[in-house]
Amino acid sequence: MSFSSRWAAFSKGLNDFYAGPYRKTFGVARRDEDDHFMLVVLAESLGVPDPAAYYTAELLPAVYEDFHDWHQRSGIPRSPLDHISCC
Amino acid sequence: MLLTDAATRHAIFVGGKGGVGKTSIASSLALARAQQGARVLVVSTDPAHNLGHLWERPIGDDIVTLWRADGQEGAGTPGCVDGIEIDPARTVDAHLAAVSTTMTRMLPERLHRAARDHLESARKAPGTYEAAVLERVAETLETGLDRYDLVVFDTAPSGHTLHLLSMPEAMTDWTEKLLANRDRSERFSVAYGALGGTKDTSDRDAELRRMLLRRRARFSLMRDTLADPRRTGFVIVTVAEPMPVAESREVASQLESLGVTLMGVVANRLSPAELMPVRREREEALLANLDLGAPITRIPLIDELVGLAALERLAGVLA
């Protein structure tokens, strides 16, 4: 291994060591925002009456793919919606 | 008085208690303006539509012509009245069909059925019907302001209409909150990416943002139009009896808190003084105590108010 590639690896390691925790913080913060958004969009089907269901319905397609990750992360092992059987 | 005031407005909401003659006042006001050469659109937002019955012709969710100034071609003042009866069910259908198409485009096949079922639950949600009415009102207001000189809304009885008028404000807030949520998510995402993380969902985020921005534009246009006293006015129709008068007071105070301008009050179906002097006196006493901060227009009782001839008489009284 040449010096430059070793240096690059070392530098990356340092970067991960210092930036990693911050990155994690931002990642978690972002996920919290997204989870909140998911909750708003899914309110009606989770049994929370949502007067804006007409409008949230059109946001649904854009969050649907994340649904499986979301309910698992929220500590619900199986899909909480009768009609969505993603797992 | 009412007609001169109406000539400066672009949108007029006609409201009041059930059965006081909102539809006939809205229609005759539209006709009177059209006779002056204005292009007018009358929109019924009441689920129990009366517009068609009054004009003696079928009116539906698409615009139909109700009256046209004849022999006026080339005169430069081609007045007309067009009408529309809002059908929220059709709006809900069209909306959900559009969302369904987007879903089919964006989602993998295995999720299609689930997504469709989900949409059915939105169809049955309590606010869906109201949202559809709001959507259509916003839509007709947009096209109406564009293509007509005046849009007259013949509204549902007071409670429904006040709720409807408060919705643009509430829904603008709602979209603002969700947009703020998207902003934060995006900023975190950028910071995350700058620190070496990867998660590329930019297409999806752009789509969400686009939809929210479109919603906000529509809601805030309606909110701003409603609150603009130079463009929009509300007319309360009442009859000179204790309960409708009490409700009119209530409506006037709620309009004030909503920031919607009350441009006039119509006291409809007043008893003929020569036939029923005592009754008329009682009515006048009620009206004398009714100071809502807007001029009161008195309309005498007109028998069998159906059809164009009757509307022309009523328009004559307004003018």
Image (cartoon, coloured by chain):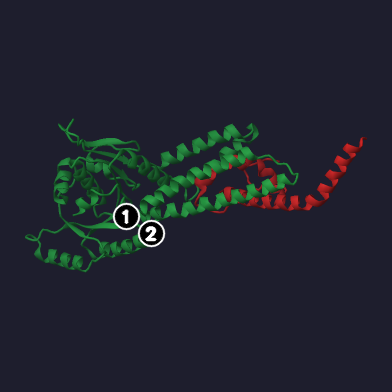
Chain colours: A red, B green
Q: Is residue B58 left or right of residue B270?
A: right
Q: Residue at x 6, y 60 (%)?
A: B274
Q: Residue at x 91, y 38 (%)?
A: A3
Find the distance from the CA under tag 1 to the CA under tag 2.
12 Å
Q: Is residue B109 left or right of residue B94?
A: right
Q: Which residue is under mark 2?
A: B258
The chain letter under disc 1 is B
Q: Position of residue B237 (x, y in %)?
A: 25, 56
Q: Position of residue B88 (x, y in %)?
A: 40, 43
- Labels in figure, total: 2
Query: Marks 1 and 2: CB-CB under 8 Å?
Result: no
Quarter of the image with the N terminus of chain B is bottom left
Mark 1: which secondary structure?
Answer: loop
Q: Which residue is under mark 1?
A: B229
As drawn, B255 above or below B65: below
Q: Position of residue B220 (x, y in %)?
A: 44, 49
The chain letter under disc 2 is B
Q: Residue furthest front?
A: A4
In this rendered view, identify the residue nearer to me: A21 or B79: A21
Mark 2: which secondary structure?
Answer: helix
* Residue B123: assigned label: none
Name the residue type under label 1: Pro
Q: Position of residue A31 (x, y in %)?
A: 68, 50
Q: Is residue B225 visible?
A: yes
In this rendered view, identify the residue nearer to me: B204 or B64: B204
Q: Is residue B237 visible?
A: no
- Which of marks 2 and 1 precedes in the sequence? 1
Closer mark to the observer between disc 1 and disc 2: 1
